[in-house]
Amino acid sequence: MPKRGTQQDLRNFEAMSLRLEPFGVVNAELLFSNMKIGSRARN
C-alpha cells in the first residue's frame, strides 16, 4: 500500500510541475528582458 501512495504523490508532483512550468518560463523571459532594458539604460 505505501508504494501506491508514493506513486500517487509522484503523479501529483508531475501534474503540479507541468502546471507551474509555463510560469517559470514567463518569469525567466521577464527577468531577461528587464536585465536587457537595465543594461541599455545604463549605457
Image: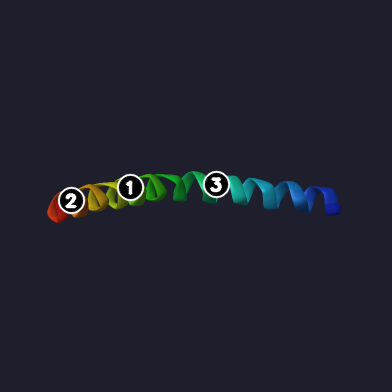
Q: Percent from the top left, x then y, of residue 22?
A: 39, 45
In space, the residues marked 2 and 3 are separated at their CA atoms by 34 Å
Q: CA distance from mark 1 to mark 3?
A: 18 Å
Observer-nearest residue: 8 or 42? 42
Which is in the foreground here, disc 2 or disc 1?
2
Residue under numbered circle 2? 37
Q: Which callout, 1 or 3, points at the residue further toward the start of the chain?
A: 3
- Per the image, label 2 sits on a secondary structure element best described as helix
Residue 14, percent across and down? Answer: 59, 45
Q: Which residue is mark 1?
A: 26
**Which amino acid does the dot numbered 2 rest on?**
Ile
Q: For the residue marked with disc 3, what is the amino acid?
A: Ala
Name the secondary structure under disc 3: helix
> If you read the primary sequence from the N terminus, does the residue marked by circle 2 or circle 3 appear first?
3
Q: Residue at image x 70%, y 49%?
A: 8
Q: Residue at x 69, y 53 (%)?
A: 9
Question: Residue 14's mark?
Answer: none
Residue 37 at x, y percent in the picture: 18, 51
Local crowd at mark 1 within 10 Å, few (<14), some, or many (≥20)?
A: few
Q: Is residue 42 above or below residue 29?
A: below
Going from the N terminus, do you reach mark 2 or mark 1 first?
Answer: 1
* Residues at circles 1 and 3 in contact by the CB criterion of under 8 Å: no
The residue closer to the viewer here, 11 or 27, is 27
15 left or right, relative to 23:
right
Query: Disc 1 on helix, strand or loop?
Result: helix
Q: CA distance from mark 2 to mark 1?
A: 16 Å
Mark 1, mark 3: which one is toward the viewer?
A: 1
Q: Report which residue position mark 3 lands on.
A: 15
Left or right position of 8 against 12: right
